[in-house]
Each structure stands twice: as C-alpha cells, then as structure tokens.
Image (spheres, rainbow, N blue to C red):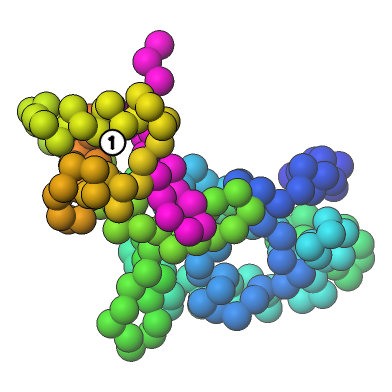
Amino acid sequence: MTHQELQRLVSIGEGQHLEFKRRVPEAGRLAKEVIAFANGAGGHLLLGIDDSGTILGVRDADEEIYSLKVALDNYCEPKVEIELERIQISRRRDVISVWVKSSSNKPHYLVEPGGTERTAYLRVQDKSVVASREAVRLMKDRGREQDVMFEFGDKEHTLMRYLEAYGRITVDQFAKIANISLRSASRTLVLLARADILILHPTENKDYFTVAERI
C-alpha cells in the first residue's frame, strides 16, 4: 500500500470495515477488534492513526507487530489469519496495516489466557459488539454442509404475518406472539435464516430479523 493509497483509505473514516488505533492497544481489546472483522465480512485495522483520521505512525513498528502477534496468539480461538503490511510515512514512523479476511472458520472467540469464558464479537457499523446467541449459532450452522429442512406450521405463519405488518422481529417478540419459549423462537428464527428466508441483523443492543429480499 502506498502513502497515497493509505490516505485514501483513511479518508473513508472508521466504519463497518475500518478501525483506527494510535498503537497496539491492550491485548484483549485488540483481539476483540480482529475477531469482529473475522466473524463478519472482514476489514482493515490501521495502527498509527488516531480517531480523527490523522496519520501519526508508530515509532517502533517491530515492537508493535510483536505485541500484536502475541495478543492474537493468546486471545483468539481459533486462530485468526491476518496479513500485515508496513507503510513508511517518515524516516522514523510507519503505519501498520492489519488486513483481516472474512473467516471460513467462524465463529472466533475472545478468550482470556487460562480462563474458560469465550465471547464472540461482530462488527456493527464502527463498533465491535458481543455476538448474540443467534448470531453464533448461525455462524456455526453455516459452517456445516447440511441441507436445511423445516415445515411451515402455525408459528411460522404467525411469524410471517407479523413481518408483513411490521417488517422486523426480535426473538422476544416472536416468542410472545407465537406463545412459545425463547429457545424455540430462537431456533426457528435461526433455521429460517439458514434457509435464506430471513436475514439476521446484529445490533449493539438486540438483534432482529427481516424477510430476505427475493430477486
């Protein structure tokens, strides 16, 4: 990447596929950003750029890259594949480009060394947020080569009538209108999303589903 290409990328601003950091942050925070990109459609993490988009560079790129690799090795499960590039912006400063592809091995989790808790993240606009149970299940199921089989019963017809009227629905709303458990509502919505009948929309607070557009 040339300096000019870097400037054009930075001018886009932080968003769904782009994150700025002045330098390598605390290990868990860094891993969270990378995991969110890998669990989604991928993205660039640029080290040496402040939040306003000012290109500052880092003074010791080798040290920053070492810290980055240690953080990802210790906090990502399974391992996330990245591509690193150094862009020299002055005699003593570089910007580090971390390209994260959309992973074929989703979901990836943030884990604390020696801990047992695992948390998956997704990118929502310019933030990395905790992935819902439904989002994690959908990532797992889409990684398996299985045909999706289901029958349209009363609850599915109730769901589609609600979506026709209101356009979107959450797990809680579906459970209430269909008079079923949250678990059953979650499983049904995920199954229909796997069949490309519905689309899951992750949000910072509560995910929702809409009907997939047919072309």
Q: Camera-side residue: 203 or 136? A: 203
Q: Is residue 178 left or right of 126 when viewed as pictured?
A: left
* 119 vs 215: above or below: below
Report which residue position mark 1 lands on. Answer: 193
* Quarter of the image where one finds residue 53: bottom right
Seen as rendered, the residue at the extreme bottom is 114
Residue 103 visible: no
Residue at point 59%, 58% (across, down): 127
**Disc 1 element:** helix
Residue at point 14%, 49% (across, down): 180
* 161 vs 44: above or below: above
Amino acid under label 1? Ala
Q: Camera-side residue: 43 or 74? A: 43
The quadrant of the picture occupied by the N terminus is top right
Q: Which residues fall within the magenta stretch?
A: 196-215
The quadrant of the picture occupied by the C terminus is top left
Q: Give the x, y percent position of residue 171.
A: 29, 49
Residue at point 60%, 80% (across, down): 26
Residue 47 visible: yes
Q: Give the x, y percent position of residue 42.
A: 52, 46
Residue at point 42%, 31% (across, down): 167
Q: Give the x, y percent position of residue 202.
A: 44, 49
Q: Is residue 166 magenta?
A: no
